[in-house]
Image: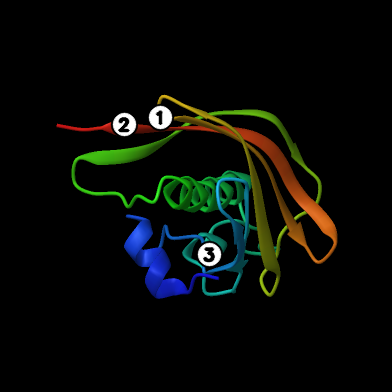
């Protein structure tokens, strides 16, 4: 389990772009289950869409990428620093299955498929209750910056 304080130490993201509220389970080097509470106070709901607010699909994918980053850092016993960044490098097989609305709890699941030379491949999905909202294979890269 990882609370918001530990998440803030592992991810460089901050409001309004931090999209993981809590880690519920982590199996080192294998999988993670995390939580994003979706509230009407999210800044994107003001424009997406005013008459029927739904969480943008790209932000659901970003939340999955952030959960995946937490799994990567945990697998490597590492934390990001000023000389390293974790990039979103690709996505395959993305399927949106259900809209995510204010009041939903988005359960973020990622399974590490491979890790080599700073490149990570994950099988991910986000659920609301038992319903899959989105699923995708994500590729992320950990790189040094100057």
Picture residue at 56% right of the left edge, 63% below the top: 45
Q: Position of residue 1 (x, y in %)?
A: 55, 71
**Residue that mark 1 sits on:** 118
Picture residue at 56% right of the left edge, 46% below the top: 29
Work out whether 4 lies above or below 26.
below
- Describe residue 80's horizontal placement relative to residue 98 as left or right: left
Residues at circles 1 and 2 in contact by the CB criterion of under 8 Å: yes
Using a 10 Å C-alpha cutoff, classify the residue at mark 3 as few (fewer than 14 neighbours), some (14 to 19) or many (20 or more).
Answer: some
Asked which quadrant contains residue 58, the reply is top right
Asked whether the viewer can see residue 15, the reply is no
**Residue that mark 2 sits on:** 143
Q: Give whichever of discs 1 and 2 has the lower sequence position.
A: 1
Work out whether 22 lies above or below 60.
below
Q: Secondary structure at mark 3?
A: helix
User: Which is nearer the eye, 131 or 31?
Assistant: 31
- Describe residue 49's horizontal placement relative to residue 12 as left or right: right
**Residue that mark 3 sits on:** 46
């Amino acid at each position: 389990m990882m609370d918001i304080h530990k998440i803030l130490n592992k991810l460089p993201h901050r409001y309004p772009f931090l999209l993981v509220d809590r880690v519920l389970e982590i199996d080192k080097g294998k999988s993670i289950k995390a939580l994003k509470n979706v509230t009407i106070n999210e800044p994107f709901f003001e424009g997406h869409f005013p008459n029927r607010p739904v969480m943008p699909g790209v932000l659901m994918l970003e939340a999955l990428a952030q959960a995946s980053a937490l799994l990567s850092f945990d697998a490597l016993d590492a934390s990001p620093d000023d000389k390293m960044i974790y990039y979103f490098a690709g996505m395959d097989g993305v399927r949106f299955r259900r809209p995510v609305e204010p009041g939903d709890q988005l359960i973020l699941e990622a399974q590490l498929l491979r890790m080599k030379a700073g490149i990570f491949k994950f099988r991910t999905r986000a659920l609301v209750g038992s319903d899959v909202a989105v699923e995708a294979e994500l590729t992320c890269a950990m790189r040094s910056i100057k």
